[in-house]
Amino acid sequence: MSAQYIHVSVAWPYANGDLHIGHLAGAYLPADIFARYHRLRGDHVLMVSGSDSHGTPITVEADKRGTTPLAIFEHYHERFLQTQRKIGVSYDLFTHTDTENHHQVAQDIFITLLERGHLYKEKQTLLYSESEKRFLPDRYVEGTCYICKYPYARGDQCENCGNLMDAIQLIDPHSRNNPDDKLIPRESEHYFLDLGGFTEQILAYLAAHEHHWRPNVSTFSQNFVKDGLRGRPITRDIDWGVRVPLEGWEDKRLYVWFDAVMGYFTASIEWARNIGKPDEWKKWWYNPDAKIYNFIGKDNIPFHTIIWQAELLGIDGIYNDDDPVYGDIPLQLPYDVPANEFMNIEGQQFSTSRNWAVWLPDLLERYQADALRFYVARTFPERQDSDFSWEGFLARVNNELLAAWGNLVNRMLGFAFKRFDGAVPAPDELTAADREIIAATEAGFDSVGALLEQVRLKEALEETLSLARDVNAWLNEREPWQSIKSDRADAARSVYAALRCIDNLKILFAPFTPFSSQKVHEMLGYEGQLFGELNIEKYNEETRDHLALVYDGGKAIGEWKASNLQPGQALRQPSPLFTKLDPEIVEQERQYLGNERVEREIV
RNA sequence: GCUGAUGUAGCUCAGCUGGUUAGAGCGCACGACUCAUAAUCGUGAGGUCGGAAGUUCAAGUCUUCCCAUCAGCACCA
C-alpha cells in the first residue's frame, strides 16, 4: 500500500489550568498512538493542535488571580508544551489561537461565510453585569421564577417547577456568584451561523460515515441534527479574542467556540508556513485520498461532527481559487471522529474545583512516561466511561507492563549479553517452534496494525501484550538456560529467536510506549531513533512571536515491519525497562486527591 | 421530564448481524521452573449475563416494563 495522508486533529485545551489525566485519556494519547503508528507505517502524518487562548474560562481565571488573560494563557501554554513533550505527544505543531496566523485565517473564514450568506444578524436581549462589565451566560444567572416564584431559579431552568426559561424572564435577576450584583437586560446584535442551511449536507455526511464511526458518536450526532439545527451566535460582547473584521464591531469578538474549532485548519496552515512550504497543508485538506481523524472527548461531539463540518462546507474552496493541483477538489471533512468517553478518578467524576484530578505535570515528576501511557491506554474509555485508580495503575504497571514485557526483555537480553559474549547469537538452523514463535510475533504487524487502523487502540494493546505473553510461554518450553549447559547450539537458536521476537515487539509496542521501545532498540545494538524529536520552538510573526511544540521526524528510522536482526550484532549492556512501583504509592497518591494543589515548576 | 448510553466472574473489561458446556487479563489456590525487577509458565476454583415478562426451535445478544448509574437537552465550550 502506498503512503497515505493522515491528518490527526486533536482537541484544543483551554489554557486556564494544567493538563490532567482526562485530557490524556480523552484525546491526546489516542491521537498520539494513532499518529505514531502511521508514522511507523511511513504515512504522511500531520498532527496538529494548540492551546485555546480565548474564552471565558481564561478571562475568569485572570480576574480571579488579578492578572491578564494574556498572562494566564501564556503561562499554561508553556506548561502544556513542556508537559506534552515529556509524555511524548508527537504534534507536528502544537501552537495557540493568539497568533497572527490564527486571527487572520479566522477572520477570512468569517468573511467568507458572511459573503456566501451563511451568517445572519440578530438582536439578543441578554443580561448585563455592570460590575463584571460583561453579559452573563444564563447559567450564571439566578432569580425568582416568574411561574412558581421559587427564589433560586437558574437562568436556564427552574429547579423547583422544572420549567425551562429565558433568563430575561426571571424576576430580580442577579449573578449567582455575587447576589448583590444586579443584572440589567441590554440589547446586543450578533452574527449567527446558519446551521439549519446545512442540514441536508450534514445528514448525508453522517450517513456516509456511519459504518466506520463509533456507534455512540454516530447516533448522538444524527439525533442532534434530527432535533433540528438552529443558528448559533458566533460573536460576543467581550474584548478578549479575535476581532470581528467589520466596521462598527470593534467592541465585539468572535465567539470562542467558533474560532477554536477551526484551529485544526489554521494550525495546518501555520505548520506549512513554518516549514517554508505555504501550500503544503493542502495535501491533507484538499486531497480526496487524505483522511482526517479528529480526536476529542465526548463532551465535544456535536462541535466536531456537525458544527465544524458546517463551517468547512461553508468555506469550501477557501485559499484554493486557482490552485493548479487542487483547484477543483472540495475541502475535506473529517473521515472519523473517534471521541472517547470520560475517565473518572477513583470512582468519582473528575472535578477541578474539588481538585479531584490527576495532574500530568505532577505525575511526570514521579512516574515514567511510558508507565502512564500504558495504564491510560489500557483503560481508555473507548466505549464507555472508565476509571483511573491507583490500585489499577500499580497492578497494570507491575503485573502487565513490567512482568510480561519488561521482564521478557530483561531476562533474554541479560541472558544473551552474559552468555553469548555481548552479541546476538548466531544460530544454525532454527527449530520449528522457534520459527513459529517468530512468525507469530510477525503476524502482529497485521493483526495489531488492523486494530490501530480502525482506532481500536485498547484491543491493539491487548493483542500486543498477548503476543509478549506467548513469547514468555514459548521460552519456558525452550529453556535456553537449561540447554546452554549441554547444547550451546540449541541455546543459540532459542535465544536468537527470542531476540527476534523482542525486536518485533519493540515496534508493536512503540506507538504505546515509545520511550522504552527506543531503549530496547538501543540495547539490541541498533543505532538511531525509532521516532523523531519533539522540540519547543519559537516562531516570529510581524508583531508578535509564540512558542510551539514541533515534531521533527527527519531522523526517525522506525518502521512497522518485521525484524531482520543480524546474528553477531553487538548488544549493549541491558538494564530494566520499567521501574517497579511500590504498593505504598496507592495511599500516597490518594492523599493528593481532593486536597489543595500547589502548582510546581516542570523540570 | 425528554433523548441517548451503561449495568456480564472479587476487580478491570471483551462478547459483531440471536445458535454447541458465557470469554480475557489481573487477583486467588495449587503445581513447575530459576535466565529474569520473587518476574515467568501450567492447572484450577469463581458469573446464568441488573430485575420481571415476552418473541423464538434457540437470547447475555431482539421487544416491553421496572430498578440503578452516567451523559446531553443549545449560548458552557
Image (cartoon, coloured by chain):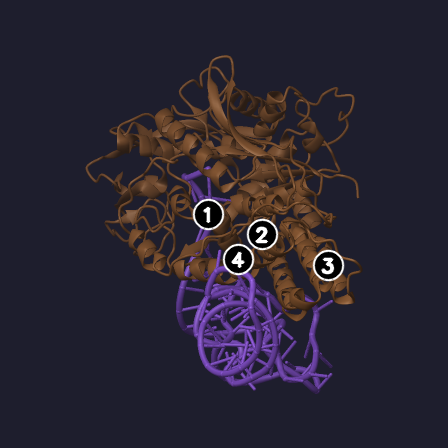
Chain colours: A brown, B purple
Badge 3 vs badge 4, beta-carbon distance below 8 Å: no
Q: Secondary structure at mark 3?
A: helix
The residue indicated by pointer 4 is: A401
Identify the residue at horizontal 75%, vertical 19% (top origin).
A322
| Secondary structure beneath label 2 | helix
Would you name the residue on which mark 3 appears?
A438
Q: CA distance from mark 1 to mark 4?
A: 12 Å
Residue flagged by tag 4: what amino acid is it?
A: Leu
Q: Determine the chain carrying the residue at label 3.
A: A
Residue type indicated by callout 1: Gln
Sequence-earlier tag: 3 or 4: 4
Q: Which residue is label 1 attached to?
A: A368
Q: Tell me which numbered mark, 2 or 1, is placed earlier along the sequence.
A: 2
Q: Residues within 10 Å of mark 1 (few under 14, many from 20)?
A: some
Checking the image for residue A217, the label placed there is: 2
Given residues A502 and A494, the one toward you in this image is A494
Q: Residue at x 78, y 21 (%)?
A: A324
Q: Is residue A500 above or below residue A248?
A: below
Q: Viewed as shown, does residue A270 lie left or right of A205?
A: left
**Residue B74 against residue A331 in the figure, above or below:** below
Q: Nearer the viewer, mark 2 or mark 1?
A: 1
Three-letter amino acid code at the position of disc 3: Ile
Pointer 3: residues within 10 angstroms few (<14), some, or many (20+)? Answer: many
User: Of label 2 and label 3, which has the lower sequence position?
Assistant: 2
Q: Position of residue A599 (x, y in %)?
A: 32, 39
